Image (tube, rainbow, N blue to C red):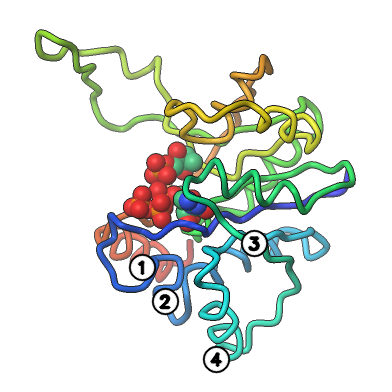
Amino acid sequence: MKKSVIIVAGGSGSRMGSEQPKQFLKWCGKPILMHTIERFVSYDRHMRIVLVLPANQVGVWERLCEQYDFTIPLEVALGGNTRFDSVKSGLEVLTEECLVGVHDGVRPLVSLETLENCYVTAAKCGCAIPVTDSFESIREMNESGSRSVNRAQYKMVQTPQVFVMSVLKEAYELPFQDSFTDDASVYESAGNEVILTAGNRENIKMTTPVDLLVGEALKKNGL
Ligand SMILES: Nc1ccn([C@@H]2O[C@H](COP(=O)(O)OP(=O)(O)OP(=O)(O)O)[C@@H](O)[C@H]2O)c(=O)n1
Ligand SMILES: C[C@](O)(CO)[C@H](O)COP(=O)(O)O
C-alpha cells in the first residue's frame, strides 16, 4: 500500500513559551519542522506528505521555505483548535487508500528504524504505535494521595502512529473526548486493536526549552 504521512504542526506551543510557534523555531540550523519533514523523505522519498499548519501561520511557513530554500513537495491543510481537529483536517486531504502515519511536527529525532518498524508493522497488522519503556518510577495519583505502580505495565507513546487510512478516518468521525491525546486513543475508541512496536528513545517531543537543549546534543552526536 502507498505510504503517506500527516505532519501535525497546527499548535501554538504554549509550553515552550516562545514568541513564535515552536515548530518554526530555528534549531540546529533550520526550523524544527523542516528537520522533521526531512526525516520522512530520507526514509521514503516517494511518501505523500500532508502538512497541517495554523491557519494564521501559512504565510510565515511560506517565507521560511523561501529563506531556507526548502522545496520538498507537500500539501498544506489548515489546523484546528485541538490536535484532534488538526489530524481530522489532514485526513480530509487523503482520498485514496494508503497507510497513513500521523506524526508530531516537533519530533525531529525520529529514527529511520522507528519509521521502518511503524510502516512495516502497520502493513502487516493494520496499525503500529511506537513506544519505549519508562526509565523512571511511576506513581498513580488518587484522592488519598498517590501509590506506586508497576512501571513494566506502562509504555511511553510516541509518533508516527501508522494506520490504514480509511479505518483511521472512520475513527475520526467520533465526537471529540478529552481522553483523545493521540491517534491510538481515537482508533481504539472506535473498537480497533492497537498494535505496539519499538520507538527510539531520542524521539522526544520538543515541548519545553529543556527538550531543545537535549535534542541539540542528540543531533550533534549524529542521532
Ligand atoms: N491544535 C493543534 C494542537 C497541536 N498540534 C500539533 O500536535 C503536535 C503535538 O502537540 P504539542 O506538543 O502539545 O504542541 P502544542 O499544542 O503546539 O503545544 P502546547 O500544548 O504546549 O501549546 C505538535 O506538533 C502541534 O503543532 C496541532 O497540529 N494542532
Ligand atoms: C501524540 C503524542 O505526541 C503521543 O505521545 C502526545 O500524546 C501529544 O500530547 P500533547 O498533549 O499534545 O503534548
Q: Which mark is residue 216?
A: 1
Describe the element under mark 3 as helix, strand or loop.
Answer: strand
Describe the element under mark 2 as helix, strand or loop.
Answer: loop
- Quick one: label 4 or label 3, which is nearer the N terminus? 3
Describe the element under mark 4 as helix, strand or loop.
Answer: helix
The residue pinned by badge 4 equals 67
Badge 3 amino acid: Leu
Apparent side of residue 72 relative to residue 213 in the rendered image (left or right): right
Badge 4 residue CB within 8 Å of ligand 1: no
Residue positioned 71% across, 75% down in the render: 72
Residue 132: image x %, image y %? 46, 34
Whole-Å distance between the Cαs marked 2 and 1? 7 Å
Whole-Å distance between the Cαs marked 1 and 4? 22 Å
Are discs 3 and 1 less than 8 Å apart at CB?
Answer: no
The residue pinned by badge 2 equals 28
- 1 or 4: mark nearer the eye: 4
Badge 2 amino acid: Cys
Residue 32: image x %, image y %? 47, 69
The residue pinned by badge 3 equals 51
- Quick one: label 3 or label 1, which is nearer the N terminus? 3
Q: Quadrant of ligand 2?
A: top left
